[in-house]
Image (cartoon, helix red, strand yellow):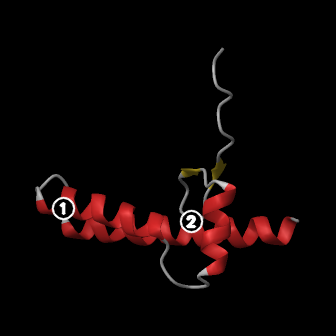
Amino acid sequence: MAKTPKKTKTSETGAQYYQSDRNRKARLEVGGGRTEMDDLIRQAVREKMLSGEISPERAGEMDAGQFIDSIDDAYSSKRKK
């Protein structure tokens, strides 16, 4: 049986975005800080930058965009409940 696709939404930065309830909760618990997921994404983006696959500017844009989208999703979901 095929898995049901996860529902995504268009994020603040225009990307199709999905964040699990667990990650939303972690985001809300740290307030404005970084979560474990943020650190993993940041590490992966940094590795791509250091290997020359993406520019430092693009790496910064990706890191900031993911952070903004995560905060927006967590807080907008909190308001809807």
Residue at 60% in and 64% down: 12
- The image position of residue 17, as x and y in percent, is 58, 52
Q: Identify the image quadrant of residue 45.
A: bottom left
- The image position of residue 67, as x and y in percent, is 49, 71
Residue at 65% in and 38% down: 6
Q: Mark 1 points at which residue?
A: 49
Which three-letter amino acid code belongs to the residue tagged 1?
A: Met
Q: Mark 2 points at which residue?
A: 69
Residue at 37% in and 62% down: 40
Q: Is mark 2 on a helix, strand or loop?
A: helix
Name the one closer to the observer, 1 or 52.
1
- The image position of residue 13, as x and y in percent, is 53, 63
Q: In which quarter of the image is the C terminus?
A: bottom right
Asked if residue 15 is positioned above or below residue 26 in the image, the reply reads: above
- The image position of residue 23, as x and y in percent, is 60, 62
Outermost residue, top side = 1
Question: Is 56 displayed left or right of 26 in the figure?
Answer: left
Outermost residue, right side = 81
Residue at 18% in and 61% down: 49
Asked if residue 11 is positioned above or below residue 42 in the image, the reply reads: above
Question: Is 78 displayed left or right of 6 in the figure?
Answer: right
Q: Identify the image quadrant of residue 46.
A: bottom left
Which three-letter amino acid code belongs to the residue tagged 2?
A: Asp
